[in-house]
Image (cartoon, grey):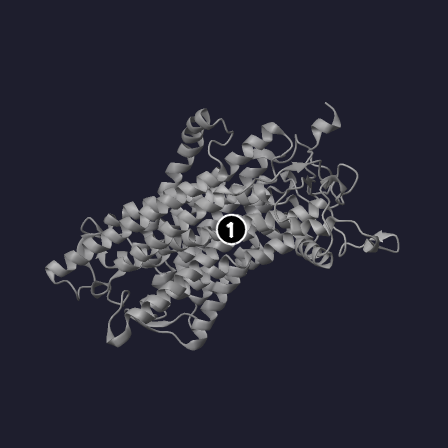
Amino acid sequence: MGDENIYTNDGTVDIHKKPADKTKTGNWKACRFILGNECCERLAYYGMSTNLVNYLKLRLGQSNVTASNNVTNWSGTCYITPLIGAFLADSYLGRYWTIAIFVIVYVIGMTLLTLSASIHGLKPECIKDDCNPTGSQTAVFFAALYIIALGTGGIKPCVSSFGADQFDETDEFERKKKSSFFNWFYLSINIGALIASSVLVWIQMNVGWSWGFGVPTVAMAIAVVFFFSGSNLYRLQKPGGSPLTRIFQVLVASMRKYSAKVPSDKSLLYETPDMESNIEGSRKLEHTEKFRFFDKAAVETETDNVKGMVDPWRLCTVTQVEELKSIVKILPVWASGIVFATVYSQMSTMFVLQGNTMDQHIGPHFEIPSASLSLFDTVSVIFWVPIYDQIIIPVVRKFTHRERGFTQLQRMGIGLVISIFAMVVAGALEVIRLDYVRRNNYYDRTTIPMSIFWQVPQYFLVGCAEVFTFIGQLEFFYDQAPDAMRSLCSALSLTTVALGNYLSTLLVTIVTDITTRDGKLGWIPDNLNRGHLDYFYWLLAILSLINFFVYLLIAKFYTYKKVTGKPR
């Protein structure tokens, strides 16, 4: 077997910075450690976050609106901080070392969170259900939350891309496995979430918050062990230098040459003469006709050379220009995911508050916490992922003749449609619940004799939508990203979740402000029996429908990227 068959052709190296040997590194043998790490890390994250709205209400004494907004603001931050991790990974550290550093930050945050709910002086003093937290206790708790947000931010944009790096894109056999990896990666996330939303939420509500936060902390420590255990098997992509610098170089160079004429023969545009790109770890990108203004950055002029060297702020390669075009092209697709993420965020806020008003009994003695119903979202994902991978794709492939069955954009679009139905179902349930309250005069009851399991369909639909949209996003942003910007683009996809949470906060704030004028209780009062949460669900359904039609236009005009050559 020749060297070209032993080593990967995508520029990856092993932990010792030597060319990655296909027989000893990567593939599923490395991915099992990455999947194990992700499962435990997500168990820790969801074990702490799924029931967070109830901790803020019960232990920190916050109202429905304040607690809901604090959860979505924090959750949003967890999906903004990935931009920090992505920049470090793509520019300087690489994905492996970025994950290695931020998992330690993550463990520190989880430990402080556990201490804030366990240690006398740090945890709020409670007499039965009446808690009176001090300002310093609240500050310590939120400090722990935002340290966790920083830790998870360093990990999120890197793990899925790092797992995909274990498959050589230039090898047809390994490339087919990569698409399947994203499905199983998301499945591992939801196995962790299933344990969190069932066992850990029950512990928090029935045993105590110190155990409820302590177990996720231990899970995070196990995630660290999983990750480092596979170090000798991993394939590492070399960082390609600051992607932001390259983007700004194209912008500056094209502005400097705003009056330059782009030649009709695109082969006259500047590019390195050999097959390799001059960007570390990146293949060359073929020229595209869209956003032609940026092509001016690759037009050669007499002033481009400084002391015999090409000035990158005056002249950029076609590949560098196409990197920027790739980012610009995916931005509309990225924006269309924000409303979907707003729908998704309701599971940790409005769905929980709605469930708090319903009968949570299973039999005469056992009660299921309302936050635990998110396990049906998880069960839905666990149910649909293997069906999608093993049944739906092969069937659709027979009709479309595409390797992946659906295109990535088609897959995401299907999820957007399902999310609309999820909001319609949630709104319909609230209409029925409020009618039951009205007919029986249950306005002032904490819970009404209506089973919480009527919420299962809305959770199940959100889970089904995730399988199509969120996994489709993971694959789309990895596949369409320039080689040296994959962590950045993964982070970009995660910011849709952040902005979705922030949009939820904004909508709740605006709705509350408008609907509570003139002394009215509003749509989302502390006593939901006297509110109209169904109106809020209808609002989200309408926004989701409008978003879907905009998405159809975006998808219609999108063109997929084309690569050539091999990485440097």
Residue 432 point in image, percent of width and height: 19, 53
Of the 4 image quadrants, the one containing the N terminus is top right
Horizontally, is 345 left or right of 424 in the view?
right
Residue that appears at 71% across and 51% down:
296
Q: Nearer the viewer, residue 247 or 305?
A: 305
Q: Residue 380 location in percent, x, y?
A: 36, 41
Question: In the visual, does 192 lie left or right of 540?
Answer: right
Residue name at image x 19 percent, y 48 percent: 363
Whether residue 170 is situated above or below residue 358 in the rendered picture: above
Residue sticking out furthest to the right: 307
Q: Is residue 156 above or below residue 518?
A: above
How crowded pointer 1 is (Cα within 10 Å; few <14, some 14-19, many 20+) is rated as some
Q: What residue is drawn where x is 66% and y is 56%?
A: 244
Indicate the quadrant containing the C terminus: top left, top right, bottom left or bottom right.
top right
Which residue position holds label 1?
332
Location of residue 252 in the rendering, given as x and y in whole percent from the top left corner: 71, 59
Q: Is residue 511 visible?
A: yes
- Name the residue at the top extreme: 1
Q: Amino acid at mark 1?
A: Pro
Q: Is residue 273 left or right of residue 541?
A: right
Question: Which residue is farthest left?
Answer: 440
Which percent across, then down, holds residue 315? 76, 52
